[in-house]
Image: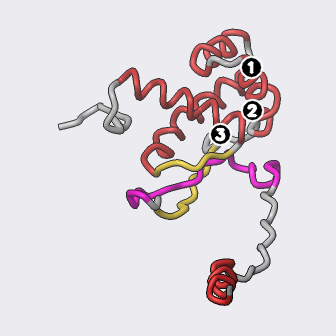
């Protein structure tokens, strides 16, 4: 029985799991949203919300604890100066998980995790131009080879 054993193991060693969460939190702070598997997104939510709570505290000890976890001065600065003030009045629930689909290679369920309110602040993706359909070149080559 798993009484009082919170968190997901994600089929990794404890050191690998810790490094994975640090990197995911760092990427989430830097880019505002991530595309990852459902299980990783649900586990990342716990750690990201803790970092935002540290950012809301705003004191030196909180900065040092955030840096000890994230390991990037720029990310800690962004967390404390840009991200945490957006959630000053919010008592939790700083991230949102949106089901995205399944991964092509192994059909793993994929989700997008982002900070709430991030859809207004994150730049929308540019729409791709559709390429104009071209004539297949192999038909021309065959016709030229047959004629000549």
Q: Which residues are the magenta region?
A: 105-123
Which residue is disc 2 drawn over?
84
Q: Quadrant of the N terminus?
A: top left
Instruction: Name above or below for residue 62 compared with residue 19.
Output: above
Which residue is disc 1 drawn over?
58
Q: Quadrant of the C terminus?
A: bottom right
Q: Quadrant of residue 92?
A: top right
Instruction: Name above or below for residue 147 compared with residue 36.
Output: below
Which residue is disc 3 drawn over?
91
Instruction: Name above or below for residue 117 compared with residue 74.
Output: below
* Image side of residue 55 versus residue 121, left or right: left
Q: Residues under labels 2 and 1: Cα distance? A: 9 Å
* Image side of residue 68 versus residue 32, left or right: left
Circle 3 crowding by C-alpha within 10 Å: few under 14, some 14–19, many from 20 = few
Residue at 82 percent of width and 52 percent of height: 123
Q: Which mark is residue 19?
A: none
- Whether pointer 2 and pointer 1 mark residues with C-beta atoms closer than 8 Å, the reply is yes
Sooner in the amino-acid sequence: mark 2 or mark 1: 1
Residue at 58 percent of width and 29 percent of height: 50
Secondary structure at badge 2 equals: helix
Secondary structure at badge 3 equals: loop
Residue at 49 percent of width and 56 percent of height: 110
């Amino acid at each position: 029985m798993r009484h009082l054993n919170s968190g997901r193991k994600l089929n990794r060693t404890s050191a690998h799991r810790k490094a994975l969460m640090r990197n995911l939190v760092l990427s989430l702070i830097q880019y505002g949203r991530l595309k990852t598997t459902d299980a990783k997104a649900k586990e990342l939510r716990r750690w990201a919300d803790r970092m935002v709570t540290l950012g809301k505290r705003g004191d030196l000890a909180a900065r040092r604890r955030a840096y000890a976890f994230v390991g990037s001065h720029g990310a800690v600065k962004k967390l404390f100066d840009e991200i945490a003030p957006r959630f000053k009045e919010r008592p939790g629930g700083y991230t949102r998980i949106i089901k995205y689909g399944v991964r092509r290679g192994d059909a793993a369920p994929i989700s997008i995790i982002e900070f709430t309110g991030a859809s207004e602040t994150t730049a929308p993706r540019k729409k791709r131009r559709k390429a104009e359909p071209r004539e297949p070149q192999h038909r021309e080559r065959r016709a030229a080879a047959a004629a000549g």
